[in-house]
Image (cartoon, rainbow, N blue to C red):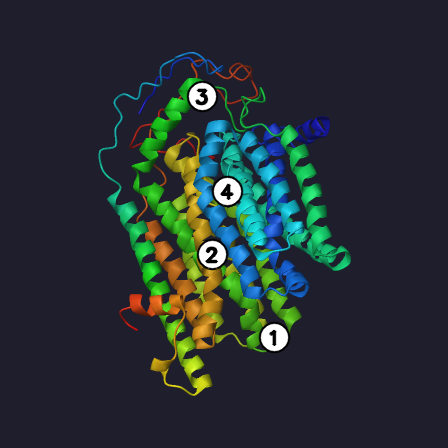
Amino acid sequence: MRNAALWLDKKFGLEEHTIAHYAWVIVFIAGAVQMVGAAIRMAFGVLVDPLVQTFGWSPGSIGLAYALMSIVAALASPVAGYAGNRFGARRTMATGTVLFFIGMMWTSQTKELWELYVAYGLVFGISQALLLVPVVPSVAAWFRRHLGLGTGIMMVSWSLGPALVVQLLAVLFNTVGWSQAFMFVGIVGTVTLSFALLFFRNTPEDAGRIAYGTRGYDKPLVTKGNVFVSTQQEFQGYVYKTNAFWNLINIHFLGCAGHAVILVGIIPFAISQGLGPLAAAGVLTTISITSVSTRFITPILSDRFSSKTVMFVSFVGQGIGVFLLFTADSTLDFYLFAVLWAIPYGGEGTSFPIANRRYYGHSPMGTTYGWQLLGAGLGMALGGALPGMMFDITGGYMWAFGLSAAFSLIGAVSITLLETSNKQLIPDWPELDDAVPGLANDPGTKNEMKPVLNQTGSNPNSGD
Amino acid sequence: MKIAAQNQPTSGSSPELGPELDGFEIKRRPILGLGLLMATVISTLAMLIYFGAWASTDRIENRAFAAGAAESHVEGNWWEDGLIMACPLH
């Protein structure tokens, strides 16, 4: 495998953008963790009918389990992020894997509604946070530069993976029943996660390697020991004192509330406008597929230019695009909306790791990112509830779509109030005294002077 | 801001010192960021109370209509009454 990667590097003359780097293994594992961790979350809709038929529970009471899981996962996100920083992403995700297994097995044996709430809502909800929050900061730790490229590739797998797994789950539910399907996915998922974690390393230093994009003049970063713990607490204290920390939580909440309304409401709205169920489902599929392109490109653009500008454009597009729905009444209108709206939607949430890097340098971003995911999770829960709520009140979806546009556009205004992302807001994360072994005298690497960061200078963390 | 980090043992067992941050300090409070977040939280809660009270009023009206009784004679659920009471516009 490594020989093939080295051959490709040589063939295409790749130096800094090498394929033969362990960071890509970490990105691949992050994609696999997301695929397994999020699959059941995405496929919850498939579970509702079998539970109604088996136990006679109302769809509303079953849906409450999903809402509970979403809120528990959101509330647990800051804790999961902190645990990833403090104890390492690998240990945190291993705990998440154990809870994933317990949650899946327990859900498969559920006989009472309260059991569903505890097994799926609570246990599975916590496992979601422990699996999905620490993995992004950990990927970031593997990229000294070009984090946008790593994030972009990870985000592509994050959107494609669940889409594939949901189809598989639907087939399983129909063939072996919901209970055995949950057991099957629980066992296969746990084995997959455990296997992936065998190869997972929290940091390049843990693996005895160097981070992707490390240059000859770079010194290794502090990643272990008492200094790591105390410095992390000190730096996190600085992070809490920046406007960007609180505003990014706010922005992620608004952005997710904005698109959750559309993702949940688009199919019933399309059907109410005369589209068949298949054509209506195709609108959502088109959104998923189209958004893959911007999920990939947006972090790269954020890394190369300004994450603040890229986020602003995404939010404005996501907000304005909703207005296409106000006049949509044909299949063409809906598919045109799907393509045009999905472009900014795909870029809405993918710039956050890059913004964190720009604002806070190489300091561990687990806690910070966990708080941002708290905002995102609550936004998704609110946005997911709004279409049904507004339909019950007004008999239509226009109010919900209006609110969606308002959330995104208010988010865009909030982005303009962020500090410039070309300036780091806290000091550089400390480095060790010695240069990275094996790179300092390597003729294949750029051996430039180390950029000195100051509070008014440009940001050295961009991929340029 | 330049930082001089102490040479870093990785065992985590020795009582080494942290980095010297050249007296770096953030004196300002994050008023703007916190204010925006609080404004969103309060606005969202207000919106939920308003629409929740609207939905509750509709539900009570529908039940009254179905029972052929006046609205004032139909009892709301605890959460319906709570939302209507919390909303100054309903």
Secondary structure at numbered mark 1: loop
Task: Identify which residue, A204 or A108, lies in the foreground.
Answer: A108
Q: Position of residue A202 (x, y in %)?
A: 54, 28
Q: Which chain letter goes with mark 3? A: A
Q: Which chain letter goes with mark 4? A: A
Closer to the chain start, of discs 1 and 3, is 3
Q: Which chain letter goes with mark 2? A: A
Identify which residue is drawn at 55% across, 53% down.
A117
Q: In whole angstroms, how far apart are the C-alphas of marks 1 and 2?
A: 27 Å
* Quadrant where the image shows the N terminus of chain A: top right
Using the rendered view, name the quadrant where residue A356 is placed.
top left
Q: In whole angstroms, how far apart are the C-alphas of marks 1 and 3?
A: 57 Å
Mark 4 vs mark 1: in front: 1
Amino acid marked by disc 4: Ile
Amino acid marked by disc 3: Val
Amino acid marked by disc 1: Leu
For disc 1, the marked residue is A275
For disc 3, the marked residue is A222
Crowding near the residue tagged with mark 1, few <14, some 14–19, many ≥20 C-alpha atoms within 10 Å? some
Instruction: Tell if the residue under mark 1 belongs to the same chain as the one under mark 3.
Output: yes
Mark 1 vs mark 2: in front: 2
For disc 4, the marked residue is A300
Q: Position of residue B38 (x, y in %)?
A: 30, 51
Crowding near the residue tagged with mark 3, few <14, some 14–19, many ≥20 C-alpha atoms within 10 Å? many
Q: Position of residue A138 (x, y in %)?
A: 52, 33
Crowding near the residue tagged with mark 4, few <14, some 14–19, many ≥20 C-alpha atoms within 10 Å? many
Would you say residue B70 is visible in this rendering?
Answer: yes
For disc 2, the marked residue is A381
Q: In whole angstroms, how far apart are the C-alphas of marks 3 and 4?
A: 26 Å
Secondary structure at numbered mark 2: helix
Up/down of A285 relative to A96, above or below: below
